[in-house]
Amino acid sequence: MAGDYDFVVLGGGSGGVRAARIASQHGARTAIVEEFRLGGTCVIRGCVPKKLYVYASRFADDFRDSAGFGWSFENARFDWPSLVAAKEKEISRLSAAYRANLEKAGVDIFETRGTFAGRGEIALGDGRRLRARHALVATGGRPHAGLDVPGIDLAIDSNRVFDLPKFPARLLVVGGGYIAVEFASLFARLGAEVALAFRADLPLRGFDADLRKAVADALARAGVALRAGVLPKAIRRDGDALAVALSDGSEKRFDQVLCAMGRAPNTAGLGLEGLGVALKANGAVAVDRYSATNVAGVHGVGDVTDRINLTPVAIREGHALADTLFGGKPTAVDHDHVPSAVFTTPELGTVGLSEEAARARFCVVDIHKADFRPMRATLSGSGDRTLMKLVVDGETDRVLGAHAFGDGAGEMAQLLAIPLRMGATKADFDATMALHPTAAEEFVTMRGPPARHLRAS
Ligand code: NDP
């Protein structure tokens, strides 16, 4: 036995690291087991490197737009290996910071795979065993292939796209979710010829329809070829390229095919079935509001539980669990009013209900919208538009949803989450002084009569 612990965490990502650190600070003897690199998906192959690549891509717009403001540039060129190397340096720094914080908090770190050998017993990849009074499954998720077509193994997923040795000059992105649209947007700006194939009529199913349309229009303006209702039927190697037969009967050549068709929870081979831990149909760990499974002493947080698969949610769940188990403060996480952003360019920021969701649930729904040319576009001449939208309960005046598509929309969504959570009404928005000249001021100056929708039944 390598150790006897109050708390053993499987998975060193956002949720697991936070839970371990707080538990240890509460006085629990804590260990964390991670088989890859500390930091998890967000830091190593998700949010952080993605946002760095989004920043890289936006210089293309800045260089182009600057001409309208009197600047001129010659020979601006982008070097992919430099970006990959700079990204690697930054995520290594962050991973080291995660380690330092865990060590500072007194958490023991085991860098190997951990699986359940029995109730309260974790088997390590190197043959050692840990005893755990409480164990936390925080093993996250991984991309799943999504399509079962010949040659799909030639495609890459979002784990591999960050470190491609060669820039993909012709890229097919398959899928219409967060990852697909973000990578389509950024690679187009970095100079790739990008096609985006997805099965629906618009990308980003589940988001407000007006914003989905705005994202599709912006992708098209950036030169992305949108192939709605089209998916690959077969992929084969053809010399240096990949020849992709598409469901519309065409065949096209690409340097890489990126499949971004959702993620699956990492529960296979952990020994959870042997313990009797209940799993959802997709393999996710089923937990209650306090992140407890049906088996005493076994808990789950983050993407592996497939509640809301976002980093801040995993962090909050991990923190709440540590407070519940070791801080004498039982804490359930509130999964309402979780803001999110899609980092296309411009970006989308959202909190609360879409118009479609509100109209399905509320009898009277008022829609306020502002659709305008952002100030920067007046001199740059770009075709960019900004869209803002408030979804209001027509009976109580409470704002149910706030959505933005434009520069800084992610930052706006973060702040809009506060009034929405507090139950702000449209009258509260109207009473708030504008800050001029900003785009966000539109949220407090939507004065015209709303479009009112009454539920049929
Ligand atoms: P999403 O769940 O967002 O999107 C999956 C996409 O794949 C959808 O367009 C879906 O189509 C499509 N799809 C799934 N199965 C099939 C199929 N069999 N045939 C055709 N199309 C299919 O997954 P992502 O991979 O983009 O991202 C995974 C998760 O990562 C997100 O849900 C999010 O939680 C997180 N994430 C968050 C980010 C952020 O906050 N900015 C950024 C990146 C990831 P359809 O819509 O028709 O169902």
Image (cartoon, rainbow, N blue to C red):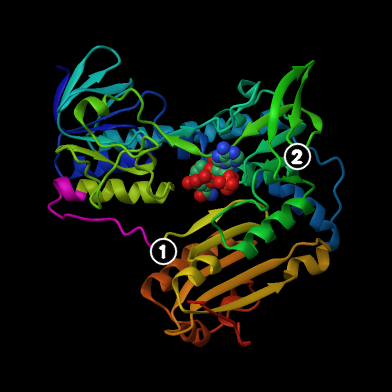
- What is the three-letter code of the residue carrying label 1? His
- Secondary structure, mark 1, is loop
- What is the three-letter code of the residue carrying label 2? Val
Using residue 311 as the reference point, say whether residue 163 is left or right of it: right
Q: Nearer the viewer, residue 150 or 439?
A: 150
Ranked by sequence position, the earlier of labels 2 and 1 is: 2
On screen, 103 above or below 71? above
Residue 148 lies, in percent from the top left, at 59, 27
Q: Nearer the viewer, residue 27 or 120?
A: 120
Residue 384 lies, in percent from the top left, at 75, 62
* Magenta stretch holds residue 330: yes
Tell me what residue is drawn at x 29 percent, y 45 percent: 318
Mark 1 = which residue?
337
Q: Is residue 402 visible?
A: yes
Q: Which quadrant of the view contains residue 231?
A: top right
* Magenta stretch holds residue 385: no
Split into quadrants, the picture shows ligand 1 in the one at top right
Ligand 1 near label 1 (Cβ, under 8 Å)? no
Q: Residues within 10 Å of mark 1 (few under 14, many from 20)?
A: some
Tell me what residue is drawn at x 20 percent, y 28 percent: 275
Using residue 398 as the reference point, say whether residue 384 is left or right of it: right
Residue 164 lies, in percent from the top left, at 65, 26
On screen, 360 above or below 23? below
Tell me what residue is drawn at x 79 percent, y 34 percent: 249
**Magenta stretch in the rendered image:** 323-336
